[in-house]
Image (cartoon, rainbow, N blue to C red):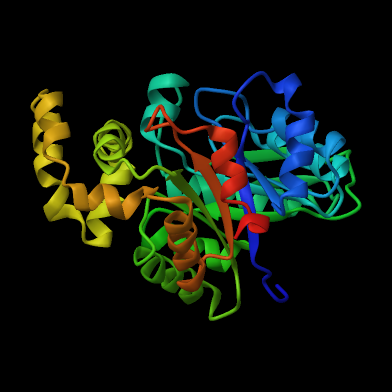
């Protein structure tokens, strides 16, 4: 890769119906944001909001953070990725990841097995598909017999891999153009980026971080609401192991034990305020911008801000504009 440029993004879809977002996207670009990154869990799919944005606002780069490697077959995945790259030449990046056992097994009834190899194989398959050659190949976790991609994007999209722990992060550095990370503190970024760069042999890689932000100075309200969000994520096995690796295990053990025992109230009470303060960006707009800058300083190259309404008194739109590059 060439020189990595610092970028500022927003997580989409925005609040409200998809058809209502056109003017808002123009405002985001006017405010200095450079990127839009979609998510895919239980809301909109990861491609439709980006397809609309591709047509509505040509100034913004588009990316997925993330599309699960399991929920689309190889050919279907290649078609979706190539179609987006064709719709937004040179400004689309595909972010892939293993997702979680909850999304893959419980919601989609797909066995969540060999997540490292599955994600790696999908990355390798997409690279093969973008050559335009017919693919007859057996990967470790699937095989493709005779597929040739019929969409030829003018510019091949960048491929990034979501990583939680050393193996996947090293693979992101070795096999792809960068890594996608979330649910970590500014200080955690150094360890994560170190693993990516170890995998890349020191070659620069894009590091995209989804950051959960609530610009509110009502710390007590934010912390109590954030604990519900933290419990929902960090009791999922892949995230629990991630935070053990980061060294946060001793402070989260009380939550994990209570959760396993079925005592949700005790689990929430066991989450230390210090953990909330590390993982959720909150405070005044100025304080939030300072914290976001710490992520950049420690190795993040692209942010994707998710404003979470932990304090009912805050306005999503005022917050996202107040955090924009033009406001800093």
Whether residue 84 is situated above or below residue 243 in the rendered picture: above
Asked whether the viewer can see residue 140, the reply is: no
Give x and y (percent) for residue 136.
Answer: 73, 45
Q: Quadrant of residue 144?
A: top right
Position of 188 compared to 83: left or right? Answer: left
Q: Is residue 302 visible?
A: yes
Image point (15%, 30%), residue name: 259
Identify which residue is drawn at 79% across, 31% down: 23
Asked whether 154 or 321 is in front, the reply is 321
Which residue is more in the foreground, 7 or 73? 7
The C terminus lies in which quarter of the figure? Answer: bottom right
> 8 above or below 237?
below
Measuring from the top left, give residue 163's x and y in whole percent.
45, 54
Q: Is residue 128 left or right of residue 318?
A: right
Among the 4 quarters of the image, the one containing residue 174: bottom right
Question: Measured along the vertical axis of the image, is residue 294 above or below residue 87?
Answer: below
Q: From the top left corner, tell me how far across and down residue 315 is, in percent.
A: 52, 32
The picture places residue 255, in percent across and down from the top left corner, at 14, 38
Q: Quarter-wise, where is residue 1 in the image?
A: bottom right
Pick the residue in front: 120 or 68: 68
Instruction: Return the residue nearer the eye: 218 or 99.
Output: 218
Residue name at image x 79 percent, y 39 percent: 26
């Amino acid at each position: 890769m060439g020189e990595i440029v610092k970028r500022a993004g927003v997580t989409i879809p925005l609040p409200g119906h998809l058809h209502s977002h056109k003017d808002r996207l123009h405002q985001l670009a006017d405010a200095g944001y450079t990127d839009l990154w979609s998510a895919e869990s239980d809301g909109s799919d990861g491609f439709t909001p980006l397809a609309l944005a591709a047509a509505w606002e040509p100034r913004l780069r588009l990316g997925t953070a993330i599309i699960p490697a399991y929920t689309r077959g190889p050919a279907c995945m290649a078609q979706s990725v190539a179609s987006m790259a064709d719709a937004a030449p040179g400004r689309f990046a595909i972010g892939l990841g293993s997702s979680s056992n909850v999304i893959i097994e419980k919601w989609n009834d797909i066995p969540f097995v060999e997540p490292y190899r599955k994600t790696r194989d999908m990355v390798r398959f997409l690279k093969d598909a973008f050559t335009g050659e017919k693919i007859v190949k057996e990967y470790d976790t699937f095989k493709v017999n005779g597929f040739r991609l019929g969409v030829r994007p003018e510019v091949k999209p960048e491929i990034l891999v979501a990583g939680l722990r050393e193996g996947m992060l090293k693979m992101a550095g070795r096999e792809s153009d960068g890594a996608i990370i979330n649910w970590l503190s500014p200080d955690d970024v150094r360890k994560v980026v170190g693993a990516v760069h170890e995998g890349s042999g020191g070659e620069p890689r894009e590091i995209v971080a989804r950051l959960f932000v609530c610009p509110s100075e009502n710390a007590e309200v934010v912390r109590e609401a954030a604990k519900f969000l933290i419990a929902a994520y960090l009791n999922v096995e892949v995230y629990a192991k991630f935070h053990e690796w980061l060294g946060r295990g001793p402070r989260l053990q009380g939550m994990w034990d209570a959760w396993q025992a079925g005592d949700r109230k005790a689990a929430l009470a066991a989450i230390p305020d210090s953990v909330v303060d590390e993982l959720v960006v909150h405070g005044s707009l100025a304080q939030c911008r300072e914290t976001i800058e710490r992520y950049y300083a420690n190795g993040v190259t692209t942010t994707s801000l998710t404003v979470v309404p932990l304090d009912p008194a805050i306005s999503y739109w005022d917050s996202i504009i107040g955090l924009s590059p033009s406001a800093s």
